[in-house]
Image (cartoon, helix red, strand yellow):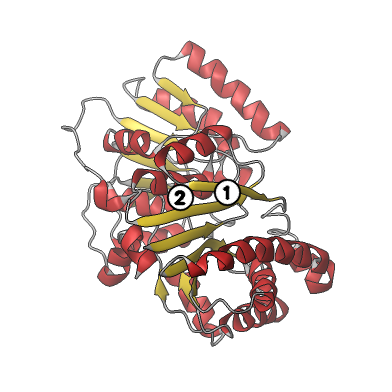
Amino acid sequence: MKSVFVIDPGMMEAGGHHAALLETLIETRQNDVNLSVFGHIELDKELYAKSIDSGIVVYRHFKTNFYQHYEDSFYLKLSGIQTYIRLLAWEYSQALSYVAQQNESMDSIVCFYPCVNWEHASALSLALASITNSPLLHHKVCCMFQPLKSSKEMDLYYKSAFRQLRKNSEVKLYASDWETKIYYDSLDLYIDDFHPCYLLPWHKLNVTKRQKPCTPNILAYFGDAKVNKGFCKLPELVERLLLAYERKIRITIQFTMAWENPALETAIRELKSLARVYEEVILESRFWSASEMVQKLNDTTHIICTYEVNDYQHKSSGLAWLARFFSIPVVIGGECWLTREFDRIGVNYAVSSELNDRTPSSIKNEREVKYKDALFDNINHWLVV
C-alpha cells in the first residue's frame, strides 16, 4: 500500500491555503493510501478533530513559525536567519526520521511539502542530508514563492537553496504558478512541472450556477484579513456599493483573523456596525469548509478584489483559480500578477480604481490550456504517481 506524508510546518490556524489543503485531503481521503500529516503543534482543534475522524493520522509536531522570515529575510540576509534554518532543519529531520522508519512495512512513501520558500528549502536540504538508508522516500516539493524584492543576492539564496535540495535524486520540484516557474527557470533550476492547486478537491466538485439572480450577490472579500489584501478598504467600499446599487445588492465578506492588528480590528468594528444597519451586508468571520466554499462560490455573481496591486505585482493568489473554476467575473483595482493570470487562464475581469464597476460581460479564452488543466488536476492521483 502506498503512503503519503504531508510535511507542513505552516499548517496551524483555520484559515489560508494550509487549512484549505487539509480540508481538501479530508474531502478526498482514499482507503487505498495511508495518509499522514505533520503539522504545527498549535494546529486548530477543529481541523485536527476533523482530520482524525476522516482517517488521517495527524502529528502536531513543528514549533517553528513558518512565516517568521517571509518579509524580513531580504534585510537579515543568510547570516541573520541561520539559527532559524537550523532549528527548522532539526524539526524536519525528526519528522523524516519517523517516516524513514516506516519504509520496511510500506511499498512506497511520498513526502509532500506543500509550500516551500528558500529558507525552508535550506532547512529541508540539511534534514535530508541527515537521513540515510531510506531509498523508498520520494519527495515532492511545491515552490510557491519568489523574492518580495528582486536582487542578485536574493536570487543567489534561492538558487543555492533549491540547487542543494535537488542534489537528492528523489526530490522533485513543482511550481505553484506560471510566473514562479519562469523565475526558477531564470536561475537554471529545473522545475519538473506545475503542482495541482490544492484549495479545493476540483475533481469532486459540482459547479452548478443558479439562474442569474435579480439582485447581484457580490463576494467583496474572502480569506485571511490582511492590510495588503485591502481589508481596511472594505467599510468605505461597502458604503459606496450600497449607494451605487441603491441597496439592491448582497455583499458577502468572509475573513479569518490570525493575528492582532489595530487597523484590521478598526475595520472589523466598522464592518460589524454596517452589518447591523444594513441587512444586505453579510459578515462571515470564520473559515469556510470546502463544501461551504463551493456553495458560496456557486451563488456569487462577481468578486471584488481589493488587493493592493503594488504588493501583488509578483505575488500569486488562489483567488484567480477559484474565479476561473467557478466562472466568476472579477473587478480589480489595477494591473498585477492577478490580471496577468486572468489572461492566461481565461477569467473575465474589469480594472477599476474605484472597485465598483458592473460585472464584466466579455468572454475570455484561456491562453495556457495545459497549464490551466494542471492547476485543476486530481491531487490524490498526482501525489502517488
Q: How many marks?
A: 2
Q: Quadrant of the N terminus?
A: bottom left
Please indicate, yes or no, whether residue 83 appears anywhere in the rendered image.
yes
Spot occupied by residue 225 in the image (x, y as percentages of width and height):
58, 38
Q: Quadrant of the C terminus?
A: bottom left
Q: Residue at x 39, y 35 (%)?
A: 219
Spot occupied by residue 158 in the image (x, y as percentages of width and height):
64, 76
Spot occupied by residue 67 in the image (x, y as percentages of width and height):
67, 54
Q: Residue at x 47, y 41 (%)?
A: 51
Tell whether 73 sits left or right of 118.
Answer: right
Instruction: Looking at the picture, tell me which residue is in the foreground, 357 or 17.
Output: 17
Compared to residue 364, the image places residue 164 above or below, namely: below
Q: Residue at x 25, y 48 (%)?
A: 204
Q: Residue at x 65, y 50 (%)?
A: 61
Q: Element under label 2?
A: helix
Say which amino acid is labelled 2. Leu
Instruction: Looking at the picture, tell me which residue is in the foreground, 40 or 296.
Output: 40
Q: Which mark is residue 35?
A: none
Say which amino acid is labelled 1. Met
Tell whether 137 sits left or right of 381.
Answer: right
The single residue placed furthest to the top in the displayed view is 277
Instruction: Looking at the picture, tell me which residue is in the foreground, 121 or 354.
Output: 121
The single residue placed furthest to the front in the displayed view is 105
Disc 1 designates what residue? 11
Disc 2 designates what residue? 21
Rendered image quadrant of residue 346 = bottom left
Q: Answer yes or no: do the residues labelled 2 and 1 have beta carbons within 8 Å?
A: yes
Q: Earlier in the sequence, mark 2 or mark 1?
A: 1
